[in-house]
Amino acid sequence: MSHDVKPSPLRSNPARQGLSGRLTVPGDKSISHRALMFGALAIGTTEIEGLLEGEDVLRTAAAMRLLGATVDNLGAGRWRVSGRGIGGLTEPADVLDMGNSGTAARLICGLLAGHPIFAVMTGDASLRGRPMRRVTDPLAATGARFLSREGGRLPLAIEGARNPLPLDYRLPVASAQVKSACLLAGLCAPGITRIVEPEATRDHSENMLRHFGATVRVAVEGHGRVIELDGQPELRAAPVVVPGDPSSAGFFVVAALIVPGSRLVIGNVGLNPLRTGLFASLREMGAKLEVGSPRLEGGEPVGDLTVEFTELRAVDVPPERAPSMIDEYPVLAVAAAFATGTSRFRGLAELRVKESDRLTGTAALLRQAGVECEIEGDDLVVHGQGGPPPGGGTVTTQMDHRLAMSALVLGLACRAPLDIDDGSFIATSFPNFLPLMNGAAGAAVIGPA
């Protein structure tokens, strides 16, 4: 899908019945990106099942091909990657176009920093407006060179280090993307790469590095962690089963909580404890949300979620929970709009540098539905309605797929329909969102505006 296509306005209508049935959501986006990248760095052939085939991940697959790996789509989420080994990536003959994917762009910066090759990276209008210096500044200590537009924005020219140095870096703000980029760079460097994060962030990179044979040590330090990676390991191909994305599952969980009469089962959801802040927060709001059939797949905890309509109460979310739910605040704000009382989400500075300024975007989304809210510093305060908000407005999505999907979920339980200006970007992370949601609702509740 081109990111310069004509906008696709959508309307979300109040659901006439509860959401029901059983469904599965697409594979975890974070794990999908990493499976392709680590497969490209491994010796041998990596078999992947359940890969998310949204545009963001397909951009990563295309980039790995340009960097010399063999990447084959075998159909129905099954992929095969024949890797080049650590330090074996080759110079791309064309520009790496990462579309809308900030995760792919930032992680590939780390991947390239340790390879003595030249590459140019770009993206769509949204990604070209997002800052990259919080990744490129620490990566420059490896010896890599980065040349960008003002403010560290794409397009970005990257010259990897011929003799990369290991990093010893303390993250000023918790970020799984920055941490993972530094670890990827450290794979090519001799010695130990050491990363300190102030709050524990999702650890898919650490889990997958171990899965492919690297030595990674993790120690707790306060609320955060110290991660050490032994450089220049020989990664060996390993099969990867990608669980359902908990961020994608969150939209259906919240939809079922706010539409009266709902009872929904969402199968095979990844339940990594560093990704489940949304579910913890919803339980604090009184949500009827249960986990069944807990199990481990590929080193990641997985389970089936059963969720029922609940009259929710307000919640106060502490700042240290933000890294475990950084992508889920818009849809949690939707839940808070229906709760009794005033909710406060604390310490959301990281939201200002997502696909959009997601903090102001979330507040604007709520206001378009008639929900009172305000931003106080880096906190979002939502005054719950104790029932359905009025609806009736049009949400500006800012080319942000999560704002778009959150608004469509909100519209399902408002008193009047809620429109969004553009739903085309939903395909970056969740290509079958609309048919899945309409199927669960038993009718075409979301369609063209």
Image (cartoon, rainbow, N blue to C red):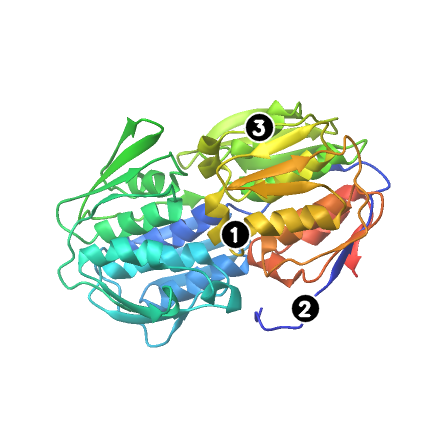
Q: Which residue is under mark 3?
A: 316
Between the residue at mark 2 and the residue at mark 1, the CA separation in whole angstroms equals 24 Å
Instruction: Please provide percent x and percent y for residue 332.
Output: 62, 38
Task: Judge by depth and name the residue closer to the eye, 166 or 318.
Answer: 318
Which element type, helix, strand or loop, lies under badge 2? loop
The front one of 283 and 350 is: 350
Question: What quarter of the picture does the C terminus occupy?
Answer: bottom right
- Report the amino acid beneath label 1: Leu
The amino acid sitting under disc 2 is Pro
The residue closer to the viewer here, 284 or 111, is 284
Q: Which mark is residue 52?
A: 1
User: In the picture provided, is 249 more to the left or to the right than 214?
Assistant: right
Q: Quadrant of residue 223?
A: top left
Q: Amino acid at mark 3?
A: Asp
Give the residue displayed 36% in from the left and 51% down from the top.
46
Q: Position of residue 22 (x, y in %)?
A: 69, 37
Q: Earlier in the sequence, mark 2 or mark 1?
A: 2
Task: Evaluate if marks 3 and 1 touch, with contact meaning CB atoms under 8 Å apart.
Answer: no
Judging from the image, what secondary structure is the residue with disc 3 in?
A: strand
Alpha-carbon neighbours of circle 3 within 10 Å: few (<14), some, or many (≥20)? some
What distance separates the C-alpha of mark 3 from that of mark 1? 33 Å
